[in-house]
Image (cartoon, rainbow, N blue to C red):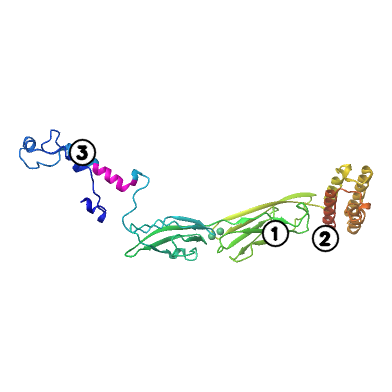
Amino acid sequence: MSLVEGGFGWNFVDGIDEAFATHGYCANDHWIVRLKESFAIQGDGIGTMHPNSKGHDLMGKKLVDKIVQDFYPGNDCSNPRRPQYLLADPGGPYMVLEGSSITLQNNSYTPFDDPLSYEWTLSADLLSKASLDNSNAKNPVLKGIDDATGSLSLRVQDSTSSNMNSTTVTVINVPPTVNPIQDDLVEHAGFFNKPVNFTGSFTDPGVLDTHTFLWEFGDGAAASGNLPANASKTLTSSHAYVYAGAEIAMYRIALTVTDDDAGTGRNELTVTIRTAQQAALELSSYINNLPDSCFSKKAENQRNTLIAKLQEVLLSINAKRYQDANNKLLYDIRVKADGIVPSEDWITDRDAQNKICAYIDAVVSYLKFLQGQA
Ligand SMILES: [Ca+2]
Ligand SMILES: [Ca+2]
């Protein structure tokens, strides 16, 4: 029997005949049931010559040892023996995000020294929702396209037989990501009644997803729309905040984008909206707080003179003499802080210059807007 061990899956259990060699029928410590014992125990001779309990004990231990070694090579219980037949094992179940890829496991096995060929197939539920880069590869790459659940089968073939098994594939929706909202204001500060332009953008790795968007402007107004799958992911919007008696007000703008699988993304931006008078006062306050080092000479004088000039601007704005206000701002104040003819600059600090010029340009633009409305 030991000569055919391994053929047809047989295993020879050795050590049993050697153990019985000194425990035979005639031995004092015998492992065989004697004729006398059969008659004494059961009243006849039937069953004599088979192992007694000691013999069975030895055979049992040897068999169990062999079985354990066979099922768990090296007695490693975490590493069971591979099956003795061709097996298709597609791994899984798999979960993949839309727009992402994973490499498939393939634990298929043949006990024979045979090359295997593979054929992976996605079920109809996953048609256009997932794809394989190579359905005949051992470990193809599975890409998620849109949320869906279906099955994935693997057929393996060796030189004589084939086997097939399936697993589950789930493609999970990814919600849109809304990027920070941009505005066209200086330091997120705008003016009443003059439209503010907002730009928002979003990403969604689901190339088949359609979207809806919702702009909320923070004053109760909103704008919404639908986007087909191939639409631009950049959204623009414009909104004017109506003056309602307060010189200054803050609004929180939100852009929410929802995909056709109820995935949602959102971003927010806060803007300050004020009157031209309020902006002139802010500029006056800014100049008042500048340290002496920001001025070219006699800081106290230059500071007070600029503040007085801004007071004149304020009076012109109050009187709706917007052209006068702009002339003052551009040709009497801005030129003293624009760095173009440095010898004429009263404010010489670079950061302060940039801030004052940007501020004045925004106010001038707004006053022109008001002029156009008058
Ligand atoms: Ca989707
Ligand atoms: Ca999506």
Ligand 2: image quarter: bottom right
- Of label 2 and label 3, which has the lower sequence position? 3
Q: Residues under labels 2 and 3: Cα distance?
A: 105 Å
Q: Residues under labels 1 and 2: Cα distance?
A: 21 Å
- Left or right placement of residue 260 versus residue 7 in this view: right
Please name whichever residue, 87 or 203, is drawn nearer the observer in this view of the structure. 87
Instruction: Name the disc covering residue 199, or none.
Output: 1
- Of label 1 and label 2, which has the lower sequence position? 1
The total number of labels drawn is 3
Disc 1 + disc 2, Cβ < 8 Å: no
The residue that mark 3 highlights is 57
| Amino acid bearing label 2 | Phe
Q: Nearer the viewer, mark 1 or mark 2?
A: 1
Magenta stretch? Answer: 62-73
| Amino acid bearing label 3 | Asp
Q: Can you tell which quarter of the image residue 260 is in?
A: bottom right
Look at the numbered disc 2 and give the secondary structure of its residue.
helix
Disc 2 + disc 3, Cβ < 8 Å: no
The residue that mark 2 highlights is 369
